[in-house]
Image (cartoon, rainbow, N blue to C red):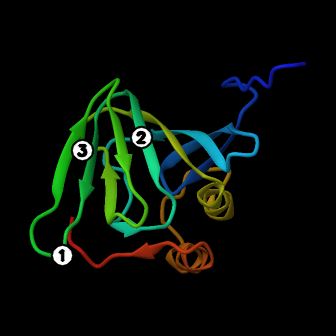
Amino acid sequence: MKFDVTTSESGEALWVVADRIRFLGGIAGSGLELIEVEIPPGSGTPPHTHASPEMFYVTEGEVTVRRFTADGPPEVTVAGPHAAIHIGSMTPHNYSNDSGRTARMLVLLESSMIAFFRDIGTSEPQAQPDFARIGSAMQRHGIEMLTIAA
């Protein structure tokens, strides 16, 4: 039996706004896939929620992860290399790179989220996000944007 090996040269990569996502593959029959996210300084996601649980594993730099609650300020975690962050299904959250250098993390998530990234990803970074296109894709993939200030 042959191993499937994804290298930095062979792996498919797309840009989701300013973040570069490399698709590393999945575990057959599990519905789980692994991606690497390269997050430049100042980049990140808006507050959102979705059915897919996620696990972030920071490999380089620092990633700020926020969990939003209805009755107070967000819970903020600044995670450095070798930290794993577990985000449950439908947990209101976002991540950002608030440092001055590039951060990288591995993300384990369900195939439904991979489909979303493939739907909105582009071959080059986006200077100005196409919010209408991203919003339509979010609806199709069951991702809800939250109106919570980060």
Which amino acid type is marked by label 1?
Ala
Q: Report helix, strand or loop for mark 1.
A: loop
> Mark 2 or mark 3: which is in front?
2
Q: Which of marks 1 and 3 is nearer the N terminus?
A: 1
> Mark 1 or mark 3: which is in front?
1
Which amino acid type is marked by label 2?
Phe
Q: Report helix, strand or loop for mark 2.
A: strand
- Is residue 25 left or right of 146 when viewed as pictured? right
- Is residue 120 left or right of 62 when viewed as pictured? right
What residue would you read off at disc 1?
A: 70
Q: Earlier in the sequence, mark 2 or mark 1?
A: 2
Residue 111: percent from left, percent from top:
65, 54
Q: Quadrant of the rendered structure where residue 57 is?
A: top left
Q: Which of marks 2 and 3 is nearer the N terminus?
A: 2
What residue would you read off at disc 2?
A: 56
Question: Is 141 situated above or below 15?
Answer: below
| Label of residue 98 in the image | 3
Which amino acid type is marked by label 3?
Asp
Q: Are the two marked residues, 1 and 3, in contact with CB atoms closer than 8 angstroms?
A: no
**Image quadrant containing the N terminus:** top right
Q: Which of 115 and 31 is in front in this view?
A: 31
Q: Are the two marked residues, 2 and 1, in contact with CB atoms closer than 8 angstroms?
A: no
